[in-house]
Amino acid sequence: MADLVGKDVVLFGLRREELNGEIGRVLRYDASEDRCAVKIESTGKTFKVHPDNLEEEDSDEGESDYDYSDSATPSDEESGWSDKEENWTPTVPVPVPKVPALL
């Protein structure tokens, strides 16, 4: 569903009911997972959503006033997202506990 990239969409039919009805913009599509990265307008958070759960927002209502490039939202690097990796694996380092040295 690469044709949705850059478009405003409405989310529906999700198990996370609080996201149903939310408006967002499709940032990218990952064919290997068949998911779109959607940045939610009201929160600025990004979620991976199956294209079947996205409906293109009617353009009759006008353009969204939300600034998706807002510097207040974390960059992909800051949020742990990386589309450079095949499966959008989080890039945030996982803390490793220190192990006492054996004498």
Image: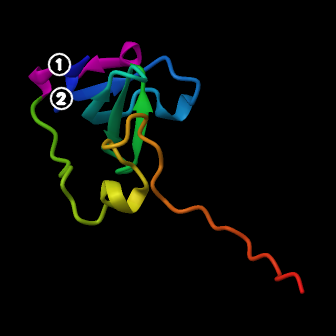
Around disc 1, counting alpha carbons within 10 Å, would you say few (fewer than 14), some (14 to 19), or many (20 or more)? Answer: few
Give the residue at x 67% y 68%: 96
The amino acid type found where label 2 is placed reads Lys
Q: Which mark is residue 7?
A: 2
Q: Which mark is residue 101?
A: none
Q: Nearer the viewer, mark 2 or mark 1?
A: 1
The amino acid type found where label 1 is placed reads Asp
**Labelled pair 2, 1 in contact (Cβ < 8 Å):** yes
Q: Quarter of the image holding residue 85?
A: top left
Q: Quarter of the image holding residue 75?
A: bottom left
Give the residue at x 40% y 27%: 21
Which residue lies under the disc numbered 1? 3
Is residue 44 found inside the magenta-colored segment of the image?
A: no
> On the rendered image, what quadrant is the C terminus found in?
bottom right
Give the residue at x 10% y 21%: 60
Q: Pinpoint residue 11: horizontal percent, then vertical percent.
A: 39, 25
Q: Which residues are magenta?
A: 51-61
- Left or right: residue 27 versus residue 62 is right
Is residue 57 found inside the magenta-colored segment of the image?
A: yes
Secondary structure, mark 1, is helix
Q: Pinpoint residue 32: horizontal percent, then vertical percent.
A: 39, 22
Give the residue at x 39% y 19%: 34
Q: Residue furthest right?
A: 103
